[in-house]
Image: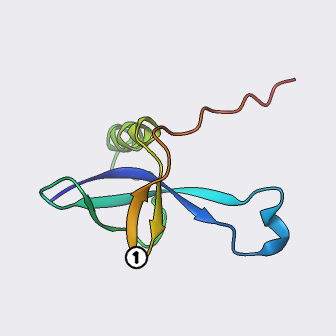
Amino acid sequence: MTWNYRIIRFPQPTPMSVEECPYYYEIHEVYYYKTGKPKMWSVDPIACHGCSVKELKADYKMMAEAFKQPILEVKKDKLVEVSKHAPPSQNTKG
């Protein structure tokens, strides 16, 4: 079974925050069927980790690949693509 890191979009749980920010995004491990369709995913979002700085950097690079993949969302207990690409980073500088 293959896996990778992917961005999963979730609706905001409280109506108060929906107007400003209807979704939030997390990086999860996603596991796939042999056909390439997502089979299951981690319940909790994933943090970078490693037994050394070198391993931490390698994990970080694998996680960064998620930004090149379509965003996923859970619908009826299945992961489905909701966009073709991750959203571009927003420039916060004036």
| Residue 28 to residue 52: above or below | below
Q: Is residue 50 visible?
A: no
Describe residue 5's horizontal placement relative to residue 11 as left or right. Answer: left
Q: Point out residue 26 in the picture as x, y percentages from the top left corner.
A: 54, 57
Query: Going 58% across and 55% down the picture, which residue do you hit?
Result: 25
Q: Point out residue 3 in the picture as x, y percentages from the top left corner.
A: 25, 55
Query: Going 83% across and 60% down the picture, which residue do you hit?
Result: 19
Q: How many marks?
A: 1
> How dense is the environment of label 1, judged by Cα within 10 Å: few (below 14), some, or many (20 and up)?
few
Query: Going 69% across and 74% down the picture, which residue do you hit?
Result: 13
> What is the quadrant of residue 78 in the picture?
bottom left
| Residue 91 to residue 2: above or below | above
Q: Disc 1 residue type? A: Asp
Query: Going 39% across and 37% down the picture, which residue do you hit?
Result: 65
Describe residue 13's horizontal placement relative to residue 81 as left or right. Answer: right
Describe residue 14's horizontal placement relative to residue 72 as left or right. Answer: right
Q: How is the image coloured?
A: rainbow
Q: Nearer the viewer, residue 46 or 32?
A: 32
Q: Quadrant of the N terminus?
A: bottom left
Q: Point out residue 57 in the picture as x, y percentages from the top left corner.
A: 39, 37
| Residue 1 to residue 55: above or below | below
Dot 1 corresponds to which residue? 77
Q: Nearer the viewer, residue 15 or 62?
A: 15
> What is the quadrant of residue 72 in the picture?
bottom left
Q: Quadrant of the C terminus?
A: top right
Q: Point out residue 55 in the picture as x, y percentages from the top left corner.
A: 32, 43
* Secondary structure type for disc 1: loop
Q: Farthest residue toward the top?
A: 94
Q: Is residue 69 visible?
A: yes
Q: Nearer the viewer, residue 19 or 8?
A: 19
